[in-house]
Image (spheres, grey):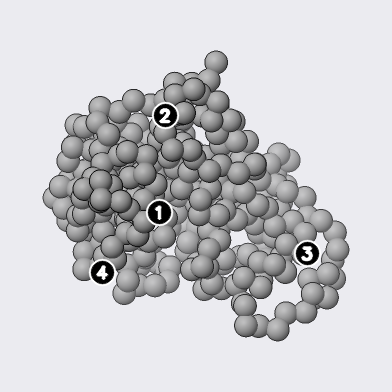
Amino acid sequence: MAPASFIPISNTVCVMDASGCLGSNLVTQLLHRGYIVHASFQSHCEVEELKGLNKEEKERLKKFETDVFDYQSIVEALKGCSGLFYNFELPHDQPTYDEHTMEIEVRAAHNVLEACAQVDTIDKVVFTSSTTAVIWREDRKTVSSNLDEKYWSDINFCRKFKLWHALSKTLAEKTAWALAMDRGITMVTVNGGLLVGPELSVTNPYLKGAAEMYQDGVLVTVDLNTLVDAHICVFEDISSYGRYLCFNHVITHPDDALQLAKLLLPSASLHPQSFQDDCNVIQQKISNKKLNKLIVDFESHPNHQDHNQLRFPNY
């Protein structure tokens, strides 16, 4: 039997941070699905008017300026909400990941989860993490099975090789899980692959170690629609639990690597031959079966006919 949909206390949810690509699209899709949305933006962030909203949807959109180091501002954004979609956006004055950014992200995760514990209407938290919090380990080449949501990136390994994005995502997620379990908060995480879209560039911090990811069979990408829909699925489905790896493409062939390189360096002169030196297809070593199963069950439930259709592709 397919699981029942999650029925929250209210249809009000918070999206934090709503300023980035994922956050703003989550806000739009949640409004389309009938939710009242508290869109939380970083302090001093310029808020562009969300496009494609009708008058009724705009009336259900409430905007909040939130500082993740100002506990009260977090609580204000969460008041009256049954759920939180949390994703961390880099500070505008700190565009790259380093040790300082890592500390900011970990402290932000702690403050937000602590605030959730103090807001009695919060039923569920969807925490955005990354596959980089899964794939980096000293023994990754000798693991016999595919990496999945049970695995964690090794903190010492990440620090040794200055994999700041991976270290930041790993520590922030671990911090969130520790607080969620201690405070009795229902939480699920969506560990997304490299987000492919117009904002993708070679400077994306996810790409540190991309060549090794490719050789290891764990270089994965996800499109924006898939990532947004996965967040909504794990929120609305009562059977969701733990972590979910979210991706819809694995870079395993030289042609795949060439196409990704063209996306990252559109103006560069790339020679296909340089990607064809080793024509062998890399063995995929990462699995998203847990999310796939949840999506199948979610789509099959009759109650979902009452909502706007989610746009899950065939994984």
**How far is disc 4 from disc 1 in space, using C-alphas?**
16 Å
Three-letter amino acid code at disc 1?
Asn
Three-letter amino acid code at disc 3?
Pro
Residue 23 visible, this angle: no
Residue nearer the viewer, 117 or 65: 65
User: Would residue 38 be found to the left or right of residue 312 on screen?
Assistant: left
Give the residue drawn at x 50%, y 57%.
Answer: 166
**How far is disc 2 from disc 3 in space, using C-alphas?**
43 Å
Number of the label disc, if any, that sits on residue 306: 2
Number of the label disc, if any, that sits on residue 46: 4
Q: Is mark 4 on a helix, strand or loop?
A: loop
**How far is disc 4 from disc 2 in space, using C-alphas?**
35 Å
**How far is disc 3 from disc 4 in space, using C-alphas?**
40 Å
**How far is disc 3 from disc 1 in space, using C-alphas?**
32 Å
Three-letter amino acid code at disc 4?
Glu
Q: What element carries label 2?
A: helix
Give the residue drawn at x 56%, y 67%.
Answer: 208
Q: Which mark is in front, 2 or 3? A: 2
**Tag 1: Cα neighbours inside 10 Å, few (<14), some, or many (≥20)?**
many
The earlier-in-sequence mark between 4 and 1 is: 1
In the picture, the quarter occupied by the N terminus is top right
Q: Name the residue under label 3.
A: 254
